[in-house]
Image (cartoon, helix red, strand yellow):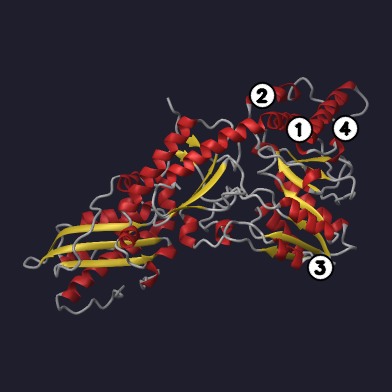
């Protein structure tokens, strides 16, 4: 029997993999030491677990285990990466380049940088959600210290041309940072091959626990340093103070290990399910996939249904846990700024649904979702005067609407 | 947002969804709202010209659950009323009946405007002066 509602909001967060929980359990009770305690076996056991986790993470993203800085999650990692570079490299310049479709953890941090006297360029994206490499290069000045562009988008799944972006940044002497939150653990991310100098990511988007994330900070070619944003005991090579969340870190490590071993199989299964969902929903007239269909994460699709209003649609798909934007913006009634950046009108941006599949999503759930969404859209369209006008061939843009 | 049972009921089982023949002289059509604002409501009435009574009412709404419920309820209330009685329907009665939250009062205003707009359309079609207080919506 299918359990309702069905969870298809895995870009917001994923459930914990039971194997991750199992790995974490001893570190909540028996092995409770402070990893910074150097004087006794309790501390050593905790430190050993943390070191092992660093190895597991390093294997997933192809870095040295010493290059991993533990944080509370991707938001903190983004803050530490951007503010840390801004402060550390102030002598060199004060210009940062990012994109309009970044997560708020990056955009709001950049706004903060502007208040501190920094200069930020927000690159636009095309209708597929991709930045232009030419525009990036044109935006770089001798003052540019950092280019920060996310790996895969949280709303559309669009994957940016990371290697090309990194090459351009490096050519002009700027560091390249990437918010890898949605990509790490889902697709192969190799910080060496990709040319990433700093990367934020988090455990709870890849079947790990909430409240623990990491920042990759390159140690060689070039050696990168970020100014700590929290003063304290000088943990994590002095870049992030605070007692380490050992059980969480163990969970992140285990999640990375599972991701490395199962990524290929998960990708094959999830992209097939995602494609089925998408193919079926696109049989509805006037429905559109948002973002690039070629360059994107395997478990995400974002679809707009024209002539259906967003809130009414959300109410109509009550048996599905999906979102109409990112979890961080759904508290407001504003349409998604990411979809608007792709050129969608307000009404189309409102009437879009984001589906995020996970390792635990079943075909039965996808079949249910297909039927449920089709029924809701069909029913709402039968009720929609705009749909009726569209069907009659009336040009809606020519109508003088009485705005309220 | 927590909706009342009545809103959910009207949303799930909308009454009087449909289209009346707007070319008929005794049919009045009101179309209010705008797609960019997220609500478009179309309300139609059919009037028995001898008794001045509304014999049928239909709606189509593009909007949230409250907008759909407000227009569905409005059609129920319109049927059987005289045109003058219909004119007296106040948006706050809709708010109370559906227990709309404050942020959704706008939907009831839209419904009241749609009623007035439909009546106005009927009046103008039949040679009566346009309503003074209601803006002519199209």
Residue drawn at (86%, 64%) of the image: A93
Relative image position of residue A114 (x, y in whole percent): 75, 65
Location of mark 1 (residue): A249
Q: Inspect this view and state whether residue A96 appears.
A: yes
- Nearer-the-camera pick, A197 or A133: A133
Q: Which mark is residue A65?
A: none
Residue A324 on image: x %, y %: 51, 50
* Residue at x-position 77% and y-position 58%: A147
Earlier-in-chain disc, 4 versus 3 = 4
Chain letter of the residue carrying label 4: A
Query: Residue beneath label 4, please?
Result: A36
Q: CA distance from mark 2 to mark 1?
A: 14 Å
Asked if the residue under mark 4 is in contact with the one under mark 2, i.e. CB atoms within 8 Å, the reply is no
Between residue B1 and residue A252, name the one nearer to us. A252
Residue drawn 85% across the image and 67% down it: A142
Of pointers 3 and 2, the one earlier in the residue sequence: 2
Q: Nearer the viewer, mark 2 or mark 1?
A: 2
Cα–Cα span, label 4 and label 3: 42 Å
Mark 3 or mark 2, whichever is nearer to me: 3
Which residue of the protein is positioned furthest toward the right in this rendering? A39
Q: Does A322 sit above or below residue A110?
A: above
Q: Indicate which label's residue lies in the foreground, 1 or 3.
A: 3
CA separation, marks 1 and 3? 39 Å
Give the side of residue A152 with respect to residue B86, left or right. right
Question: Residue A363: image x %, image y %?
Answer: 48, 31
Residue denoted by label 2? A19
**SS label for mark 3:** loop
Badge 3 crowding class, 10 Å Cα cut-off, few under 14, some 14 to 19, many 20 or more, is: some
Q: Quadrant of the C terminus of chain A?
A: bottom left
């Amino acid at each position: 029997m299918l359990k309702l509602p069905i969870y298809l909001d895995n870009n917001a967060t994923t459930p914990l993999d039971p194997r991750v929980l199992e790995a974490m359990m001893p570190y909540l009770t028996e092995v409770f030491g402070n990893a910074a305690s150097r004087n006794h076996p309790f501390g050593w056991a905790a430190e050993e677990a943390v070191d092992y986790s660093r190895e597991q993470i390093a294997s997933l993203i192809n870095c040295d285990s010493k290059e991993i800085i533990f944080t509370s999650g991707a938001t903190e990692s983004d803050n530490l990466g951007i503010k840390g570079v801004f402060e550390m490299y102030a002598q060199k310049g004060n210009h940062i380049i990012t994109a309009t479709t970044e997560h708020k953890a990056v955009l709001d941090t950049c706004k903060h940088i502007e208040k501190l006297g920094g200069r930020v360029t927000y690159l636009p994206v095309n209708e597929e959600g991709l930045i232009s490499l030419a525009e990036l290069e044109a935006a770089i000045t001798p003052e540019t210290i950092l280019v920060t562009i996310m790996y895969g988008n949280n709303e559309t799944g669009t994957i940016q041309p990371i290697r090309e972006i990194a090459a351009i940044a490096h050519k002009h002497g700027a560091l390249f940072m990437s918010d890898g939150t949605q990509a790490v653990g889902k697709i192969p991310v190799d910080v060496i091959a990709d040319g990433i100098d700093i990367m934020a990511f988090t455990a709870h988007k890849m079947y790990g626990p909430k409240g623990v994330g990491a920042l990759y900070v390159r140690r060689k070619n070039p050696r990168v340093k970020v100014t700590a944003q929290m003063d304290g005991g000088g943990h994590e090579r002095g870049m992030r103070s605070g007692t380490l969340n050992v059980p969480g870190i163990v969970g992140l490590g285990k999640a990375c290990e599972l991701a490395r071993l199962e990524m290929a199989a998960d990708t094959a299964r999830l992209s097939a399910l995602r494609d089925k969902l998408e193919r079926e929903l696109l049989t509805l007239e006037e429905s559109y996939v948002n973002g690039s269909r070629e360059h994107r994460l395997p478990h995400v699709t974002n679809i707009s249904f024209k002539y259906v209003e967003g809130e009414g649609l959300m109410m109509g798909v009550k048996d599905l846990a999906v979102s109409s934007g990112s979890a961080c913006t759904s508290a407001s009634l504003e349409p998604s700024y990411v979809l608007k950046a792709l050129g969608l009108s307000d009404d189309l941006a409102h009437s879009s649904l984001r589906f995020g599949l996970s390792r635990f999503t079943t075909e039965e759930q996808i079949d249910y979702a297909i039927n449920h969404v089709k029924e809701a859209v069909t029913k709402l369209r039968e009720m929609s005067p705009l749909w009726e006008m569209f069907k009659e061939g009336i040009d809606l843009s020519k109508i003088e609407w009485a705005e309220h | 947002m927590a909706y009342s049972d009545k809103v959910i009921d009207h949303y799930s089982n909308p009454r009087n969804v449909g289209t009346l023949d707007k070319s008929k002289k005794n049919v009045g059509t009101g179309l209010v709202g705008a797609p960019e604002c997220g609500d478009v409501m179309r309300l139609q009435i059919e009037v028995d010209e001898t008794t001045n009574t509304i014999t049928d009412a239909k709606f189509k709404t593009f909007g949230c659950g409250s907008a759909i419920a407000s227009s569905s309820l409005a059609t129920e209330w319109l049927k059987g009323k005289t045109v003058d009685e219909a004119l007296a329907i106040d948006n706050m009665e809709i708010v109370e009946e559906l227990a709309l939250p404050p942020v959704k009062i706008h939907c009831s205003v839209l419904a009241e405007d749609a009623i007035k707009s439909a009546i106005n359309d009927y009046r103008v079609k039949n040679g009566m002066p346009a309503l003074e207080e209601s803006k002519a919506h199209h």
